[in-house]
Amino acid sequence: MRMQSLNNINILVVEDDEITRAALKLGLKRSCNVYHEASNGLEGLEKFKKYKIDIIITDIHMPGLNGLDMIDEIKKLKPTQNFIVMTSYDTDENFFRSIKQGATQFIRKPISIEDVQNAIFIVLSKIGDKTIRLSENISVNLDRENIFVDDRQVFLTNLENKLLWLFCYNIDRVVTYEMIEEYAYSSSEVRKSSIHTAILRLKKHLDGINIENISGKGYSLRSYE
């Protein structure tokens, strides 16, 4: 019965060990809404930017970009992202760093699927139904990533969706041009005029939201008071 609570959850597993990755896939995939996996931190970061991910389960020690550095990069884009960190050998320094960086749960290897499932349920119990208002008639559900205009759910283009949620993750903070390129344009270099045009289209589709241009830096979505 508890596993049914995962039906609407999108999970990303980042693990370089094939056996562990296969075990997690076998134990979790059929219960999740969407299941993604990556074999290292760089691949995990790219999948985070491409897909909507509710919970990231990651190893620490991986070649290339390790788990903690991947968490750093993701938190720059989405400070509220949920993580479960697992590792076979570790130090107190890595343990406390992972907690400080946003790991909701910490699992030591060898893992059992039951331990992972319990960690997921603990994370889910802390995920609320946070809604913020962007204008008098526009609101968003941050946890489910739903957009409402006059209490009616609306949908955007893929680019507009990426831009909006990047702004919502960082509401009232500056979203730099570099952050926009990395998250919304898959790290491709984009002319500032093209970004400006995309934001104008977003503002047209969600008439009333307040996105300010911060000269020379980027943009900021202002909360509605």
Image (cartoon, grey):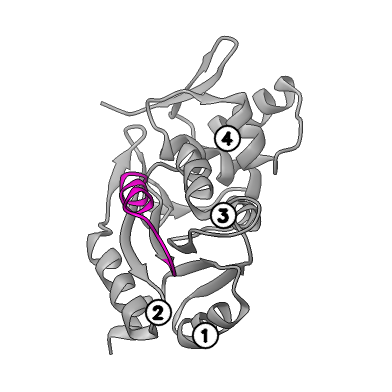
Q: Nearer the viewer, residue 183 or 148?
A: 183
In reply to whether residue 94 is colored magenta, the answer given is yes
Between residue 169 and residue 12, name the one nearer to us: 12
Name the spot of residue 193 as percent of width and height, x first.
Answer: 73, 20
Dot 2 alpha-carbon crowd within 10 angstroms: few under 14, some 14 to 19, many 20 or more: some
- Disc 3, disc 1: CB below 8 Å? no
Q: How many labels does the image show?
A: 4
First-in-chain label (2 vs 3): 3
The label on residue 48 is 3
Say whether residue 170 is visible: yes
Mark drawn on residue 210: none
Type of amino acid at the residue the image marks with label 3:
Phe
Quarter holding the N terminus is bottom left
Specify few, some or many for label 1: CA neighbours under 10 Å numbering under 14, 14-19, or 20 or more. Answer: few
Q: How crowded is mark 3: few (under 14 residues within 10 Å), some or many (20 or more)?
A: many
Q: How far apart are marks 2 and 3 (CA)?
A: 23 Å
Please provide the residue range marked out in magenta: 87-101
Name the one closer to the observer, 150 or 176: 176
Which residue bears the numbered disc 2? Answer: 111
Say which mark, if any, is on residue 23: 1
Frontmost of labels 2 and 3 is 2
- Residue that numbered label 4 is attached to: 202
In this rendering, position of residue 138 left or right of residue 183: left
Q: Earlier in the sequence, mark 3 or mark 4?
A: 3
